[in-house]
Amino acid sequence: MARLEVKLADITTLEVDAIVNAANEALVPGGGVDGAIHDAAGSRLFEACRAIPEVRPGVRCPTGEARVTPGFDLPSRTVVHTVAPVWRGGRHGEDDLLRECFRNSFACAAKAGAQSIAFPAIGCGGFRYPLARAASIAVEESSAALRRYPNLQVYLVAIEHDVHTAFKRALRESGDAA
C-alpha cells in the first residue's frame, strides 16, 4: 500500500488516527469541511475548541499553526485544527503559510501518536486558495512528512470530483505516485 493516497470520501467517516480540520482562527464552527467535522464530532468538539486559550482576542489558532482536540463522535480519535491563509493573489506569503499548516499539522499528529492522518483541501473553500496550487503543496509537504515520519499513512481526501482530480494530478506530477 502506498503511504500517500488520494481518496474520494467524506473525511468525517474515515477510520484514521487523525483528521485535519480546515478551521478558522477562532476555532468556532464554520462552513464547509469545518462545519461538517463539528457536526459529525458533536457538541463536545466545540467545547474542546473553546477551552483552547486565546493567543490574542478572538484567536485560538493563528494562520499556519495547528491545535489538537479529541475526535469525540468521529471515527478518528484526534482532530488537528489548522488555519489556512486567505488567498490574496499569492504575493503575501500564502504558500509559506499553507506549508506551515501542513508541517504543524503533521507535527501535532505525530505528537499525539497518530499513525494515519487525513487532510482535506485546506484553504480551497471560503479562503479561496487556488486548488491546483494547494494540491501541489499538499503533495510536497506530505511527501516531506513521510520522510520524517516513516510509519505514517497519509490520505489526501476529497468529497468533490474536481478536488480529487487535482490531488491525483499533483501526486502524479510529483513522481511520488505509487
Image: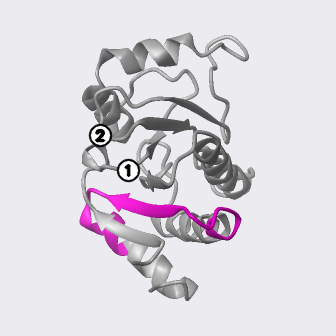
The residue closer to the viewer here, 75 or 12, is: 75
Q: Quadrant of residue 6?
A: bottom left
What residue appears at the point 32 percent right and 59 percent down from the top-left corner? 158
Disc 2 secondary structure class: loop
Q: Position of residue 64 (x, y in %)?
A: 67, 42
Q: Quadrant of the C terminus?
A: bottom left
Q: Quadrant of the N terminus?
A: bottom left
What residue appears at the point 61 percent right and 14 percent down from the top-left corner? 58
The residue closer to the viewer here, 19 or 36, is: 19
Lower sequence index among marks 2 and 1 = 1
What stretch of residues is rendered in magenta?
Answer: 146-165
**Residue, disc 1:** 16
Total residue callouts: 2
Question: What amino acid is found at the position of numbered circle 1 in the picture?
Answer: Val
Packing grade of label 2 (10 A; few <14, some 14-19, many >=20) is some
Residue 75 numbered mark, or none:
2
Disc 1 secondary structure class: loop
The answer to whether residue 177 is above or below residue 25 is below
Q: Are marks 2 and 1 in contact (CB under 8 Å)?
A: yes
What residue appears at the point 31 percent right and 28 percent down from the top-left corner? 41
The answer to whether residue 158 is above or below residue 136 is above
Q: CA distance from mark 2 to mark 1?
A: 7 Å
Question: Residue 148 magenta-drawn?
Answer: yes
Q: Position of residue 46 (x, y in %)?
A: 41, 17
